[in-house]
Amino acid sequence: MENTLSGDGEEIDAYVLGEFEPLDEYEGKVIGIIRRLDDNEDKLVVAKELNSYDKLQIAALTEFQERYFKSEIITFDYLKSSIRNTAKALIRRENELLVLEELVELI
């Protein structure tokens, strides 16, 4: 991904699922993150639609490369439920995302 920086100092890499021809560009939705526990570079998982692949499918489709690393797959569903269970509100202010752990009355 252009104009990004990963832990290895290079641009962030992404696995694009559901496409079977070589791509020069792609526009999709981030459906997960592969967090490498023994490396400094995580990978995004991208597809046309949210929730189009579950953790087992993502693991199977990325195993060709990820078998060399100890990693965990964090899916959009997990992130959504995790935020819902820990945050009471999300507020966007310009380029910031504020997470409130308890609701406050805004005047």
Image (cartoon, grey):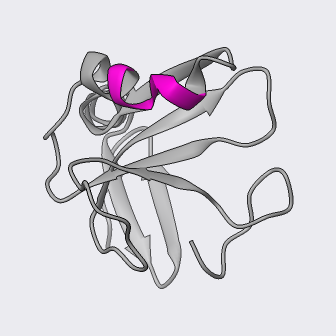
Please indicate whether residue 37 sits to the left or right of residue 46 in the image: right
The quarter in which the N terminus is drawn is bottom right
The quarter in which the C terminus is drawn is bottom left
Check the image and report above or below for 19 versus 77: below
Q: Residue at x 21, y 49 (%)?
A: 18
Q: Nearer the viewer, residue 105 or 61?
A: 61
Check the image and report above or below for 8 versus 33: below
Q: Residue at x 35, y 30 (%)?
A: 61
Q: Position of residue 21 (x, y in %)?
A: 28, 62
User: Can you tell which quarter of the image residue 101 is in?
Assistant: top left
Please indicate whether residue 29 sits to the left or right of residue 93 in the image: left
Q: Residue 69: within the magenta?
A: no
Check the image and report above or below for 68 versus 18: above
Q: Residue at x 69, y 20 (%)?
A: 69
Specify the segment rendered in magenta.
Answer: 60-65
Q: Residue furthest front?
A: 21
